[in-house]
Amino acid sequence: MSLYHLYVYKQQVLIPTVCQTETGVYLDEAPVTSIDADAKESLEAALVNLLSSENPRISTAEAGVQAGSAILDLLAIKKWSDFEKQAIMYTIHSDNQRISIYITGRGPDGMWKQEFQRESSFEISTAKPAIVGFLIQEIERDILDEEQRPRVLLLPPPPAS
């Protein structure tokens, strides 16, 4: 079994190294690959490589040795909530039968919901370039949706009369 994450943040696709601890927990670790969403050839190659890889194994003691998040460090963002409000998470799960892709939904507060917005599944025998083509279409769709998503603007209360 393998598990991968990618995040669409603004015009960037972020691909962390998802490691598995000896207790079976999956963690986003460095290095994180950042690819401009418009660089389709680079994105295709990175995604085919991702789907062809296995999760590196790390000891539970190594997990989280460095405080913080490799993704936040790369983007120079201090709070995960600031990232989450502007990002979409893709979770890709691969086992002996299928490759499943889950895409986060967004709640009214702008944060990710527990329920996935969309999910798709492919037989394990499906050619990786076909799955990557699907992923790129979804990424392009999400970037357009994010650009059109209304933003909440909080105004200060009116002055007291």
Image (cartoon, rainbow, N blue to C red):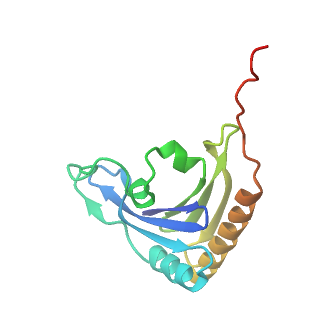
Find residue 5 and report its horizontal and vertical position in percent. 49, 61
Q: Nearer the viewer, residue 26 or 40?
A: 40
Q: Nearer the viewer, residue 136 or 39?
A: 39
Find residue 57 and report its horizontal and vertical position in percent. 28, 62
Q: Is residue 62 visible?
A: yes
Residue sitting at 54 percent across and 68 percent down?
Answer: 13
**Number of callouts in the render?**
0
Q: In the orientation shown, which residue stands out farthest toward the top?
A: 161
Q: Is residue 127 visible?
A: no
Judge from the rendering whether residue 29 lies leftward or rightward of residue 45; answer left or right: left
Judge from the rendering whether residue 37 lies leftward or rightward of residue 71; answer left or right: right
Judge from the rendering whether residue 97 lies leftward or rightward of residue 110; answer left or right: left
- Is residue 114 depicted above or below 123 in this figure? above
- Is residue 112 depicted above or below 56 in this figure? above
> Which quadrant of the rendered structure holds the N terminus?
bottom left
> Which quadrant of the rendered structure holds the C terminus?
top right
Find residue 71 and report its horizontal and vertical position in percent. 43, 57
Residue sitting at 55 percent across and 48 percent down?
Answer: 84
Q: In the orientation shown, which residue stands out farthest toward the front?
A: 161
Find residue 56 and report its horizontal and vertical position in percent. 31, 66
